[in-house]
Amino acid sequence: MGRRARVHRETTETNVAVAVDLEGGAILVRTTIPFFDHMLTLMAKHGLLGLEIEASGDTDIDWHHTVEDVGIALGEALRRALGDRAGIRRYGQSGVPMDEALASAHVDLVTRPFLVYNVPPAAGQGGGFDVDLAEQFFRALVTNLQATVHLALSYGSNQHHILEALFKAFGRAFGEAATADPRIAGPLSTKGML
């Protein structure tokens, strides 16, 4: 299986380079947004992924373009690393507590992109990071990964804890779904394809 991929995305607003290894490896994330770097690093760590991201953008205007374009490039890199998705477990799920917050993620690595983001809208920031940017990141990632992902917050009040629980839960659920299993021949589907 081709379990590694690199993607470079350059626009007039951003420049993003991503390398992923589904079998693990070094994690080095530099997006010029420290809190986002922290979230991506812990997502990779808990998903047992190797991940390198180098990104810059027009953050003097807003963080939205950089966050969204990192999601686009990361989703594409993960999609490429999965190859034809043969021999993987396909489904993954995780619930992650972070102090008072509890978040869950459910991932189906089918090739139909769909995001359910069941996290109540919240004004404010976690680590200086606008909370609503997390949904934009996950939407871009899921669309380009071509997966169905459900993210939910059961409860929580601290924005940092909520975001950290969401990113960790997604990392763990994705890592489980992307795990190669020698018992699975071809795609895990009665249709014969995902």
Image (cartoon, rainbow, N blue to C red):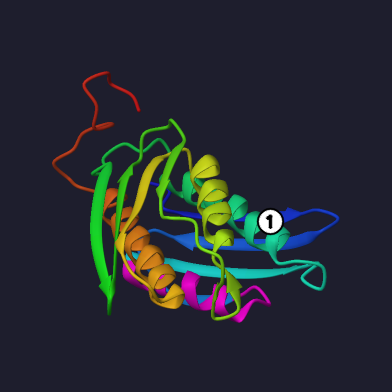
**Residue at the spot of label 1:** 8
| In magenta segment, residue 34 | yes
Nearer-the-camera pick, 2 or 111: 111
In the image, what residue occupies the spot 58% across and 53% down?
136
4 to 131, vertically: above or below:
above
| Quadrant hosting residue 99 | bottom left
Q: Amino acid at mark 1?
A: His
Asked if residue 44 shows in the view, the reply is no
Where residue 156 sits, quadrant-wise, is: bottom left
Question: Can residue 153 be seen?
Answer: yes
Residue 193 image offset from top left, x and y in percent = 33, 24
In the rendered image, residue 46, in percent from the top left (x then y), is placed at 32, 70
How crowded is the residue under tag 1: few (<14 C-alpha within 10 Å), some, or many (20+)?
A: some
User: Camera-side residue: 47 or 99?
Assistant: 99
Residue 39 image offset from top left, x and y in percent: 48, 72
Mark 1: secondary structure: strand
